[in-house]
Image (cartoon, helix red, strand yellow):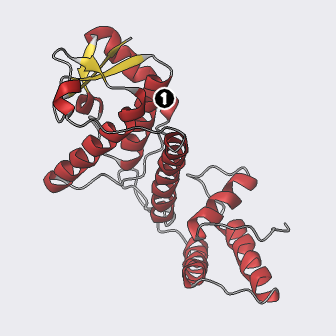
Amino acid sequence: MNLKIDNFEGPLDLLLHLIKENKMDIFDIQVEKITEQYLQFIQQLEDKNLEIASSYLVMASELIELKARMLLPKPVVTEEEQREDPRDELVTRLLEYQAYKAISDELKKKEKMRQEIYTKLPTNRKEYQPNEPSAISQGDTLDHLLDAFQKFLLRKQEEQPLQTKVTMKEITVSSRKLEIREKLKKEKRVRFFDLFPVLSTEYLVATFLAILEMARNQELIIQQDRLFAEIFCEVN
């Protein structure tokens, strides 16, 4: 396989590219094949006399070690015991990077859209503050939600660490949209933070993106009585 020297954002970005190009299941990575192609990429950089970032070399050594571990005889275990897969740690890192990359791309799109909007801050915000609850404007939705979401993560991080255990059930934006629709269908109006019952990175990112997409498609309304007040989501 001949690889082009693309501008990858890092070794994990390169690995995700290789997995996608080979149409592999991220939970069942063919370590030997991926390692061979990764080292081929490093060799192309050396042949072109390009500077190789240390992070790429560190990942190369980790892949070689992982390949060696996969070739070792597997210990005999009973049915009650669960054999540890040497690839679990790498899969966890790839899933977390993939989730953060997805939300990063979404935020870049929002930032580009906001650059086309020009606003003037009012002299006195109280003059423009409605007395009754109203929906947050589309331009301000992301700012409000990001600020509230960051505070929510900090508070939960102090209570307990985010789960990073690898699971075979993939959490997608589409699946979270279906679950949110069902919840709103039953309860009509739900607190924003009640839509995050699971504190895994993949689940948090998928849920946050699902809410933004549903708000953009006018499937739900995001409301806040006043600045810094509780945020609610309800069916449009």
Q: Is residue 62 left or right of residue 96?
A: right
Residue under circle 1?
Answer: 213
x, y percent for residue 95: 49, 53
Q: Is residue 225 left or right of residue 183?
A: left
Compared to 171, does 200 lie above or below?
A: below
Q: Nearer the viewer, residue 74 or 170?
A: 170
x, y percent for residue 205: 41, 43
Q: Is residue 131 left or right of residue 72?
A: left
Q: Residue at x 26, y 29 (%)?
A: 192
Instruction: In the displayed orientation, state which residue is furthest to the front.
Output: 123
Instruction: In the displayed orientation, state which residue is furthest to the right.
Output: 2
In the rendered image, the quadrant that contains the C terminus is top left
SS type, badge 1: helix
Compared to 224, does 182 lie above or below?
A: above
Q: Mark 1, residues whose alpha carbon is within 10 Å: few (<14), some, or many (≥20)? A: some
Kindly indicate the quadrant of the structure image that contains residue 73.
bottom right
Compared to 218, does 162 lie above or below?
A: below
